[in-house]
Amino acid sequence: MICPKMESFHQFRLWVLAFCFITFQSCNGFYLPGSYPHNYAVGDDLWVKVNSLTSIDTEIPFSYYSLPFCQPEGGIKDSAENLGELLMGDRIENSPYRFKMYTNESDVLLCRIDKLSADQFKILKKRIDEMYQVNLILDNLPAIRFTKKDDYFLRWTGYPVGIKIQDAYYIFNHLKFNVLVHKYEETNVARVMGTGDAAEMIPPIGKEGSEKPGWMVVGFEVIPCSIMHNADSIKNSKMYSKYPSPIKCDPSTVAMPIKEGQPLAFTYEVTFEESDIKWPSRWDAYLKMEGAKVHWFSILNSLMVITFLAGIVLVIFLRTVRRDLTRYEELDKEAQAQMTEELSGWKLVVGDVFRAPSNPSLLCIMVGNGVQILGMAVVTILFAALGFMSPASRGTLVTGMLFIYLILGVAAGYTAVRLWRTIGCGDQKGWASVAWKAACFFPGIAFLILTTLNFLLWGSHSTGAIPFSLFVILILLWFCISVPLTLAGGYFGAKAPHLEYPVRTNQIPREIPQQRYPSWLLVLGAGTLPFGTLFIELFFIMSSIWMGRVYYVFGFLFIVMILLVVVCAEVSLVLTYMHLCVEDWRWWWKSFFASGSVAIYIFFYSVNYLVFDLKSLSGPISATLYLGYSLFMVLAIMLATGTVGFLSSFWFVYYLFSSVKLD
């Protein structure tokens, strides 16, 4: 027979192992379970795909074929896209770049543009000025470019459209590709890594080399060059034919200026290189952020400091409250009555502490939406830390967030309606209206912000604009999934028993004494401590969104989020107790905004990031898009953190006045 202490110890060990597993996997590019490598035989076709043109100067993506580039012979075709890719502005299409596995090629002619029209010349110059990057994809790997600066190699995804030197514009019209391949050795890798379907799709290799060995793509590098081609010599040449003269690619020099009315020629070369990189590690090159050591040290230091401070606050707070309770309960009734007359503090607001707040329905709706957003964040980050939403699966993170949010409409409706009934002392009247408003509050604001920003993107002809058909799909998802689930949750909340207050509320509200300082000033200042737990991680998240980097440390993000929830709860508890001690019984909204005020500091930080880190962000449209998306993010954070603070304060007040018998 196992004793309870030993069983608890074993459970604790399991939790520690699971925690270490999540953190370890987040640091090592963990892949989506069930994914498998694609095995190519020598000579098999490899087709390069193109994604939207992107720039950290404007943050407005454009289609690859909006510029005068070569088009594939069979026409432009969209690749399979999920909902997340469309929402993120990705437009993956086919391209004319074609390779043969493990077959080096040089001086390959792609196409010839007869004449640059005035519009084409103008848009090329504009894209070069705005530092737009061309994004290519091979076997689901983005093209990566290495540049050397002060003995350090910098990694970039994609390559620039061109470069401006003095008053001349040069285009990169020759690409030198280097494809890293790894020999396919494990014949049963599909059974180990994937499912039965994967095993059928990966052909087996014969014993002792009886068949041609297979190869997997583990790296895709590009070097752009500007070459002065003789356009007249290739007038009658076809795509993929040999260029008449040898091409020497030197990335340190440029030679092809663009001029209106002049032709352009595009060429490429490709070499294959056998690499020791194994297929599960092929994304490591993309996940190596510059300054990674500083990142880990800063996060760990922040976690240790904030945990220490939160522990001190929690210990002092619990000792103060427990001493107050113990001192009061040890007195007899006469002494209690005399003490009540002599002392001031939270004991004097017993008849008002559960008085309904102003705008109770709005509070219930915001708390319900906060539960929905917080639940979505927890589940999404946990799944991402476990590898189910890896960077290799484009759009999976956004798609997962959307559908988890829709499903958690049940929790939003249940929480909002049950809180509504608790405030109303069990009255079910109006629960359907509260549930309906909870289903429309945050999504309605989100649609308003996104629609406004979408009009700006439509006016710029950007691929970041959400198509009208996708708008219809999102509205259908909202009203056909989220709203019914929220109403269903509200129904269950109306049927569930409400919480009965431990004390009675007086008919006449108690007058609140004059305060030395405005209470809302203290509430707004309370957001500084939660902000201190996440501002370092926030920098890396902002950099990944606006600077084109890949964010992958979801294990640490999960830890920071848990710490943020704990700190928000503690801050709200302390502020609520302080307000009750000065006989201020209006704690409902103040407890919500005590932790929710962290959103104000995040918005100020976003403005600071715009001014000092995104100095190159050009144009009012780009700045408006940035501020609009930041406002959307800040609103979601305010609802989530405010909900944590309110629910923890509600539990504390309920527990505090349930522990003391007051007449």
Image (cartoon, grey):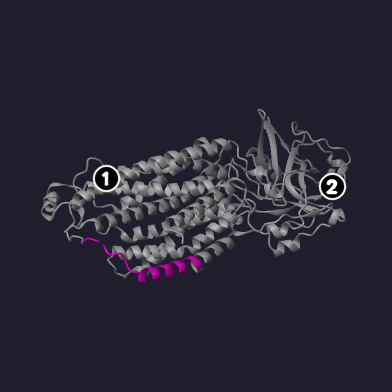
Classify mark 1: residues with Cα within 10 Å, few (<14), some (14-19) or many (20+).
Answer: few
Residue 614 visible somewhere in the drawing: no
Classify mark 2: residues with Cα within 10 Å, few (<14), some (14-19) or many (20+).
Answer: few
Q: Residue at x 19, y 51 (%)?
A: 328
What's the amino acid at mark 2?
Thr
Q: Nearer the viewer, residue 149 or 204?
A: 204
On residue 562, the disc is none
Q: Residue at x 78, y 57 (%)?
A: 74
Q: Which residue is mark 2?
A: 103
Dividing the picture into quadrants, the one containing residue 488 is: bottom left
In contact (CB < 8 Å): disc 1 and disc 2: no
Q: Earlier in the sequence, mark 1 or mark 2?
A: 2
Residue 538, percent across and down?
49, 43
Residue 4, percent across and down?
42, 58
Mark 1, mark 2: which one is toward the viewer? Answer: 1
Residue 198, percent across and down?
71, 61
Element on which disc 1 rests: helix
Q: Which residue is mark 1?
A: 320
Please determine whether, in this image, residue 322 is positioned above or below residue 430: above
Residue 150 horizontal side relative to residue 111, left or right: left
Residue 568, percent across and down?
39, 48
Magenta region = 481-503
Residue 384 horizontal side relative to residue 279, left or right: left
Residue furthest toward the front?
Answer: 1
Marks 1/2: CA distance?
Answer: 76 Å
What's the amino acid at mark 1?
Thr
Residue 426 horizontal side relative to residue 381, left or right: left
Please determine whether, in this image, residue 310 is positioned above or below residue 493: above
In magenta segment, residue 659: no
